[in-house]
Image (tube, coloured by chain):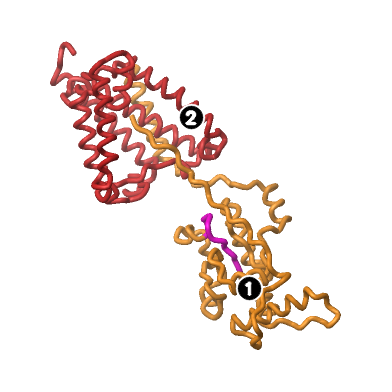
Chain colours: A orange, B red
């Protein structure tokens, strides 16, 4: 057999092999377990209900609320402007553009913190950025923003500032009694840095 | 791990240097394989010499198998590989113009530079033509823009359009290439040319 035929047969065999094996769909994890541990301990993914309320009141255009509860629960009540991505569907292609992007700041929420945090862990493992978790979820949202408790008279001034803001915010969101809206003093937090993804493009070639 | 440049394992500066070295190697091999003769490329059209077909398809198959096996072993993330976006209408018209240019001129852009490097005057004229073409295309771009951008289909892969896996597509391409190699050799026998 000539060398050429041997090469031909070799190429064919390689082709058959590559046609038979399943495509490698395992995306290499972008984060190691150690990286993940550091991130979780740093808790940089957490945003407070007050921060979310402030962004909502100021109509921050980069905020995207994502409700990870079931569609039923979403129908009953959801935060203003939120979209519904149930955690069971979080890996679906149709939502990929929402959860993997570099412009909007996604804030995930569920009833408590657990559901949204589970979703966040999955997304973070895939290497997606700009996803955050609303601490305490909707339960905490109702306790603090919608029905703020008046702090004790001996509380520091910040507590009162917080209370005033919460009362004002709850008026905006349709709870509690109307109070003139004042900007929060203590609750205002720096918006997490929005990172724009680098364009992954190589120069096109030709012959 | 790979691709090395988009993952920034190789920096942008090294990228250019490596491209330069690979480019020199590519030119050297083209010249050594006789591609600096305009008759070689024209022979593909007239059927007396199908080396061009064999070389470029062998190159494509090698790269294709390499990428797929690298991906299988987890050495490269194929999602990060740049895929040229498809503009159907302009791709067809551009292909026809480029193919006609190959036959008339006897060079492709790469081989013309090779041939010019060893002093072939026809190749230098060909390069002049390339620059004229680039100039008029760029100047006339506002007129051509609508057509140029029409039929945008994004970065498409044939395997995705057909709904088959990349591996099956690769096997089909290999089979097609081997059949074409055989047909090419039959053509060489059918339309032989003694001296060129």
Q: Chain of mark 1?
A: A
Q: Is residue B55 magenta?
A: no
| Residue shown at the point (32%, 13%) measured from the top left | B118
In the image, A132 versus A84, the foreground residue is A132
Is there any visible trace of residue A32 in the rendered image?
yes
Residue identifier under label 2: B16
The numbered dot on residue A121 is: none
**Image quarter in which the C terminus of chain B is found:** top left
| Residue shown at the point (63%, 64%) measured from the top left | A133
Q: Chain of mark 2?
A: B
Is there any visible trace of residue B163 in the rendered image?
no
> Disc 2 versus disc 1: distance between alpha carbons?
49 Å
The image shows residue B87, relative to residue A55, as above or below, that is above
Left or right: A196 with respect to A40? left
Give the residues in magenta: A99-109
Crowding at label 1, few (<14), some or many (≥20) Cα neighbours within 10 Å?
many
Left or right: A30 with respect to A148? left
Crowding at label 2, few (<14), some or many (≥20) Cα neighbours within 10 Å?
few
């Amino acid at each position: 057999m000539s060398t050429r035929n041997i090469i031909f047969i070799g190429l064919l065999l390689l082709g058959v092999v590559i046609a038979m094996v399943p495509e490698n769909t395992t995306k290499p994890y972008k984060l190691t377990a150690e990286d993940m541990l550091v991130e979780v301990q740093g808790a940089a993914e957490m945003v407070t209900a007050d921060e979310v309320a402030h962004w909502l009141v100021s109509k921050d255009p980069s905020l995207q609320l994502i409700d990870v509860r079931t569609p039923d629960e979403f129908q009953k009540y959801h935060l203003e402007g939120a979209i519904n991505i149930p955690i069971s569907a979080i890996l679906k292609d149709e939502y990929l553009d929402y959860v993997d992007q570099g412009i909007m700041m996604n804030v995930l929420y569920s009833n408590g913190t657990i559901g949204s945090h589970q979703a966040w862990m999955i997304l973070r493992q895939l290497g997606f950025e700009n996803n955050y978790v609303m601490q305490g979820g909707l339960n905490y949202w109702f306790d603090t923003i919608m029905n703020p408790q008046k702090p004790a008279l001996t509380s520091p001034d910040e507590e009162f500032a917080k209370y005033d803001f919460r009362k004002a915010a709850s008026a905006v969101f349709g709870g509690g009694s109307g109070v003139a809206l004042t900007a929060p003093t203590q609750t205002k937090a720096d918006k997490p840095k929005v990172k724009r993804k680098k364009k992954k493009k190589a120069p096109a070639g030709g012959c | 791990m790979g691709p090395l440049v988009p993952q920034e394992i190789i920096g942008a500066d090294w990228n250019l240097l490596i491209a330069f070295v690979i480019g020199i190697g590519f030119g050297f091999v083209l010249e050594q394989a006789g591609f600096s003769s305009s008759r070689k490329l024209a022979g593909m059209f007239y059927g007396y010499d199908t080396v061009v077909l064999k070389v470029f398809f062998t190159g494509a198959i090698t790269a294709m198998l390499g990428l797929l096996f690298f991906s299988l072993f987890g050495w490269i993330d194929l999602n990060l590989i740049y895929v040229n976006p498809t503009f159907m209408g302009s791709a067809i018209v551009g292909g026809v113009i480029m193919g006609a240019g190959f036959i008339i001129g006897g060079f492709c852009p790469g081989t013309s530079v090779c041939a010019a490097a060893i002093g072939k005057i026809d190749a230098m004229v060909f390069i002049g033509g390339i620059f004229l073409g680039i100039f008029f295309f760029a100047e006339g771009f506002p007129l051509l823009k609508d057509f140029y951008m029409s039929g945008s289909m994004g970065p498409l892969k044939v395997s995705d359009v057909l709904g088959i896996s990349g591996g099956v597509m690769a096997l089909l391409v290999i089979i097609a290439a081997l059949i074409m190699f055989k047909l090419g050799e039959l053509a060489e026998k059918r339309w032989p040319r003694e001296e060129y």
